[in-house]
Image: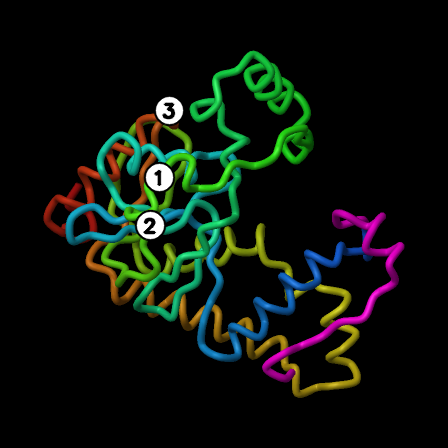
Amino acid sequence: MSEEPKITFNPNYYKFITHRIMNLHSVGYILTDLATLLLLKKGYAPIHCSAFKKGDAAVAVFAPPSTGKTLSSMMACMDHGAQFIAEDLAITDGTKIYSVPWTSTFRFYSNMEQSTASKMKNKAVKILPPLEYVSFSKAKPVTDYVDTGSILDEEIVTHVAILERGVDEVAIQDDAEAVRKMLNLNRNAFHYLKSPFLTAYEFFNPELDIEHAAAQEKAVLTELISNSEKVFSLKAENPTDYAHILVEQIQAPALKLGSI
């Protein structure tokens, strides 16, 4: 619980446990769970989203896995002159979004890589989704796609978008429903509530208070929604359509619920 938390592990555990296998979590996952909880205790919520800024508007983009949040923000930067904030992971205090720019999940997207091997892998992933996490090449840094001068460290969030698959549609999102969806999507990336490591620690150290961290997460996301000028859901049958629609929406006047 200090400013410099430490964990001790067996070298063989570090070497062989590389993913979540029942109650065995890799060291990387354990550290992610621990960092998430400690950030929440300080009033910051890690968020599973992409984000970019265009003009005076900064949008945080949430979406279920493989829907297109990374693709959307990268295309907004590469094709529409937006500035990069995040592609898969960020941190918020309920007002600002803070960049974590080195997560590099670009290798999963055929629009960024058009080699024969990439196309074959994308087809295989549709049949067997876990193959998405198998890579024979090194992930490329964000600077391979976006100029260093266009990477932002922190911005005030003005818009929140939630991407979904379906017939093309844009709709203003109710605040409570938006928070519910964001919490649900966060559960896909952050597992501190179900972490065996943190659960065992809390048994002997009740001051860890995992439930309080969960309440803090909801409070921060609620504040983020409340502070935003416009919160909307966006459906598109073609994921490559999200970027230009997002740019249009964040540059359009804010609308009230049911106006679209």
Location of residue 225 in the rendering, given as x and y in whole percent from the top left corner: 31, 62
- Foreground pick, 259 / 96: 96
| Residues under numbered marks 1 and 2 in contact, where contact means CB atoms less than 8 Å apart | yes
Residue at which label 2 appears: 151
Amino acid type of the residue tagged 1 in the rendering: Val
Location of residue 176 in the rendering, given as x and y in whole percent from the top left corner: 36, 61
Residue at the image point whose x is 34% and y is 46% from the top: 148
| Quarter holding residue 235 | top left
- Counting other residues with Cα less than 10 Å from the Cα at mark 3, is it few (<14), some (14-19), or many (20 or more)? few
Residue at the image point whose x is 68% and y is 25% from the top: 128
Q: Which residues are magenta?
A: 1-21
Amino acid type of the residue tagged 3 in the rendering: Glu
Compare marks 3 and 2 and give the one earlier in the sequence.
2
Asked whether 59 falls inside the magenta stretch, the response is: no
Residue at which label 3 appears: 237
Location of residue 223 in the rendering, given as x and y in whole percent from the top left corner: 33, 70
| Quarter holding residue 129 | top right
Residue at which label 1 appears: 146
Q: Image height check: is 240 above or below 40?
A: above
Callout 2: SS: loop
